[in-house]
Image (cartoon, rainbow, N blue to C red):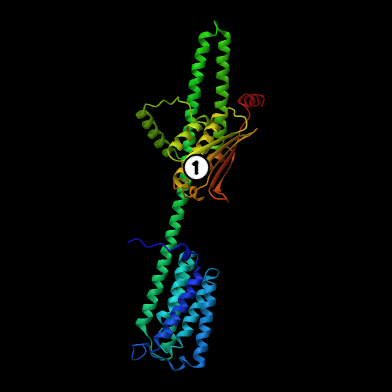
C-alpha cells in the first residue's frame, strides 16, 4: 500500500508546531492516566504524592516551558532544542515516581529526532540519537547508583522508539536526496538532449544547403558560356547559401560543447533508421516561421485556438535562428495543449531591427507549463542561451502562463564574411 500524502495545508505546519503539539498531547495523556475516569474503579497509574502539590505543579510548569522553548528551536538550533526536550522529559518524569522515563514523555523527543534526521545532515541526526540514548542510560545509571529501582523493559522500549524515529527520518532524508539527484540528472539530460537535437537540426540544414549549392553550381557550370547572367545568378545564390551556412555553423560551434558520444551515436542510429523506414530525404528544408501558420491551424483543429500576431517588417532570418524560434513556439504551444487546461493561446512574433522576439501566452491555470515532465522549459532555455538570447517563463499576474524569448539576429552573411576576410 502507498502512504497517503499529507494535505497541502498540513505541509505548511512547521516541525516545531508538531513537536509542541505532541508534548501537549502526551502531557494531557499523563495527567488523564492518573485520574479516575468515568467507568473506572481506580486510576490507571499510581499518582505520586507531589503530583498535585505546589512543587509538583512547579515541576510541571518548568518542564512545559522547557519543552515549548525547545519546540521553537527545532528548525534553527536542532541539537539545542533536543537538549531542552530531553531535559523537560527527565524533569517531568521525576514528578511521576516511576523507575524509567515514560514513553509519553519521550514522544516529543521522538518527533524531534525524526525532523532532525529528515532535515539535517546525517552527522547531526546521529548526534541527536546519541544524545537521546545517553539521557536514557544516564537516568538508569543514576537510579542504580542511588539504590533505587529501575524499569529496564520500559527504558528499552523508549530507546527502541527513538531508534525507529531516527531511522524513519534518515530514510526520508535519503529519499529526498535521491529525488533531488534524479531531478538534477533529468534536467542535465534534458539539456544534453536539446543540444543533440540542435546539432541534428544543424546537420540537416547544412546538408540541405550543400545540396542547394551543388545544384546551383552544376547549373552554373552548364550555362556559364551560353547564359553568363544566369550563371552569375546561380553563383551568387551559391555564395549566399555558403555564407549563411558558415555563419550558422560558427554560431553553434562556438556555443555548443561536446556531448556524450555514445548517446549521440545511439540517437543518430535511431534517427537514421526512422528516416530510412519513412523514406525521408535528408535534403528536405528545415522548419521555420514559414510553417507557423500551419502549426497554428493544426493546433486549432485539435481543440486549442492559436492566434498568431505578426509585428514589424517580416524578413528572412538565418536558418538556425528561424528554426530555433519555430521550435520555441512549437514547444510552448505543446505545453499549452498538454497542461494549461485552456481553449486558446496567443503567439506574437515581433521583428525588431537587431532581434526577433516571441511571446506565447494563455489564460489557463497559470502553472501548467511548470509541470512539464519532459523538461520542455529547460530545453527552450538552453536553446535560447546557445544563441545568446533572453528567455523568461512563468505565471502571469492576471492568470495564465507566459513564455517569452528574444534572439539576436546577426548581421547579414555578406557583411560577416567581409569582416572575416578583412580581419
Q: Is residue 269 left or right of residue 386?
A: left
From the image, tell me which residue sits under label 1: 344
Question: How far across and down, in percent of the image, does residue 378 sit?
Answer: 50, 45
The N terminus: image quadrant: bottom left
Residue at figure coordinates x 48%, y 24% from the top left:
208
Closest to the observer, 328 or 80: 328
Question: How far across and down, in percent of the image, does residue 370 sit?
Answer: 49, 49
Relative to 102, say whether 308 is above or below: above
Query: In which quadrant of the rendered view does residue 142 lie?
Result: bottom left
Relative to 298, say whether 279 is above or below: above
Closest to the observer, 271 or 123: 271
Closest to the observer, 239 or 307: 307
Q: Could one spot residue 16 in this view of the protein?
A: yes
Q: Residue furthest right?
A: 422
Residue at figure coordinates x 33%, y 91% from the top left:
41
The C terminus: image quadrant: top right
Q: Could one spot residue 101 in this view of the protein?
A: no
Q: Residue furthest top?
A: 226
Question: How far across and down, in percent of the image, does residue 68 sit?
Answer: 52, 77
Q: Is residue 39 left or right of residue 217?
A: left
Relative to 183, say whether 104 is above or below: below
* Disc 1 packing (10 Å; few <14; some 14–19; many ≥20): many
The kind of secondary structure element at disc 1 is: strand
Residue at figure coordinates x 38%, y 62% from the top left:
4
Residue at figure coordinates x 34%, y 29% from the top left:
277
Count all numbered tags in the image, as a single digit.
Answer: 1
Query: In which quadrant of the rendered view does residue 228 lie?
Result: top right
Relative to 335, say whether 254 is above or below: above
Amino acid at each position: 500500500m502507498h502512504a497517503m500524502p499529507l494535505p497541502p495545508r498540513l505541509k505548511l505546519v512547521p516541525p516545531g508546531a508538531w513537536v509542541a503539539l505532541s508534548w501537549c498531547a502526551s502531557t494531557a495523556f499523563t495527567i488523564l492516566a492518573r485520574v479516575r475516569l468515568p467507568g473506572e474503579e481506580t486510576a490507571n497509574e499510581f499518582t505520586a504524592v507531589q503530583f498535585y502539590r505546589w512543587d509538583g505543579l512547579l515541576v510541571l510548569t518548568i518542564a512545559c516551558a522547557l519543552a515549548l522553548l525547545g519546540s521553537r528551536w527545532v528548525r534553527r538550533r536542532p541539537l539545542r532544542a533536543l537538549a531542552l526536550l530531553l531535559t523537560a522529559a527527565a524533569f517531568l518524569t521525576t514528578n511521576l515516581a516511576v523507575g524509567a522515563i515514560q514513553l509519553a514523555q519521550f514522544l516529543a523527543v521522538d518527533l524531534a529526532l525524526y525532523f532532525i534526521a529528515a532535515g539535517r545532515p546525517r552527522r547531526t541526526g546521529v548526534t541527536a540519537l546519541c544524545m537521546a540514548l545517553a539521557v536514557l542510560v544516564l537516568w538508569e545509571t543514576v537510579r542504580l547508583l542511588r539504590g533505587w529501582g529501575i524499569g529496564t523493559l520500559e527504558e528499552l522500549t523508549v530507546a527502541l522508539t527513538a531508534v525507529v524515529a531516527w531511522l524513519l527520518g534518515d530514510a526520508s532524508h535519503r529519499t529526498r536526496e535521491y529525488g533531488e539527484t534524479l531531478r538534477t540528472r533529468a534536467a542535465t539530460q534534458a539539456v544534453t538532449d536539446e543540444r543533440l537535437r540542435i546539432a541534428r537540426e544543424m546537420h540537416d540544414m547544412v546538408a540541405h544547403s550543400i545540396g542547394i549549392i551543388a545544384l546551383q553550381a552544376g547549373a552554373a557550370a552548364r550555362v556559364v558560356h551560353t547564359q553568363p547572367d544566369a550563371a552569375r545568378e546561380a553563383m551568387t545564390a551559391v555564395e549566399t547559401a555558403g555564407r549563411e551556412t558558415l555563419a550558422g555553423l560558427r554560431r553553434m560551434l562556438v556555443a555548443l560543447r561536446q556531448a556524450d558520444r555514445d548517446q549521440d551515436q545511439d540517437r543518430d542510429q535511431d534517427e537514421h533508421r526512422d528516416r530510412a523506414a519513412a523514406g525521408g530525404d535528408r535534403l528536405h528544408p528545415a522548419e521555420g516561421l514559414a510553417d507557423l501558420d500551419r502549426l497554428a491551424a493544426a493546433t486549432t483543429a485539435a481543440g486549442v485556438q492559436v492566434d498568431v500576431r505578426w509585428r514589424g517588417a517580416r524578413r528572412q532570418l538565418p536558418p538556425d535562428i528561424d528554426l530555433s524560434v519555430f521550435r520555441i513556439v512549437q514547444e510552448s504551444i505543446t505545453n499549452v495543449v498538454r497542461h494549461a487546461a485552456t481553449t486558446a493561446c496567443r503567439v506574437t512574433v515581433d521583428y525588431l531591427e537587431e532581434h526577433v522576439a516571441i511571446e506565447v501566452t494563455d489564460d489557463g491555470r497559470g502553472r501548467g507549463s511548470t509541470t512539464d515532465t519532459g523538461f520542455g522549459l529547460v530545453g527552450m532555455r538552453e536553446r535560447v542561451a546557445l544563441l545568446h538570447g533572453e528567455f523568461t517563463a512563468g505565471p502571469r499576474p492576471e492568470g495564465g502562463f507566459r513564455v517569452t524569448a528574444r534572439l539576436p539576429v546577426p548581421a547579414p552573411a555578406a557583411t560577416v564574411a567581409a569582416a572575416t576576410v578583412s580581419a
